Image (tube, rainbow, N blue to C red):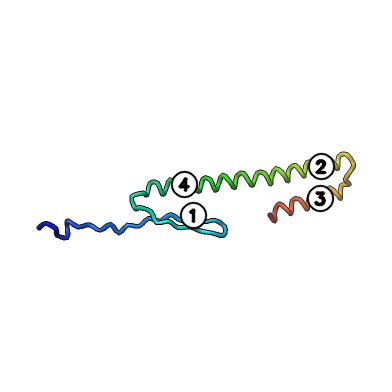
Amino acid sequence: MAGGPEDHFTDSRELYVLVEGDEWAHMEALDPDAGYWARRFAQLVNWRARGEKAVIEPSSLQRRNSQLKEIARLRAEGALTESEFEAVKARLLSDEASA
């Protein structure tokens, strides 16, 4: 029997990629056979997102550490009293914790 049900196959697979930002999202339908490339794309997006975060976080940490070193130097030189030093240090550390 040519043309019977066993000769006809309907591919009902669907593949979507979703990329989200803080205030936006985009979804794209892809060819279901592009699964490898969709996974690779998702890996690259995730890797880049983690990389960007890694670049941002150390700079704020470095800035705070630099500020702490500076106020320690000012205290050592007598430009800040111990209580002034402790107050500024507490503010720097609380600003970092709330960021």
Q: Residues within 10 Å of mark 4 (few under 14, many from 20)?
A: few
Q: Are dots 2 and 3 in contact, CB under 8 Å?
A: no
Marks 1 and 4 sit apart, C-alpha to C-alpha, by 12 Å
Identify the residue under disc 2: 72
**On screen, residue 92 above or below 74:** below
Marks 1 and 2 sit apart, C-alpha to C-alpha, by 45 Å
- Of 91 and 27, nearer the camera is 27
Q: Are dots 1 and 4 in contact, CB under 8 Å?
A: no
Judge depth for marks 4 and 2 and give the one in front: 4
Q: Residues within 10 Å of mark 3 (few under 14, many from 20)?
A: some
Q: Residues within 10 Å of mark 1 (few under 14, many from 20)?
A: few
Query: Which amino acid type is shown beneath numbered disc 1?
Result: Val
Identify the residue under disc 3: 88
Locate the N terminus and report the quarter of the image it occupies. Answer: bottom left
Farthest-out residue, left: 1
Marks 4 and 2 sit apart, C-alpha to C-alpha, by 43 Å
| Residue 4 image position (x, y, % from top left) | 14, 59
Judge depth for marks 3 and 1 and give the one in front: 1
Marks 2 and 3 sit apart, C-alpha to C-alpha, by 10 Å
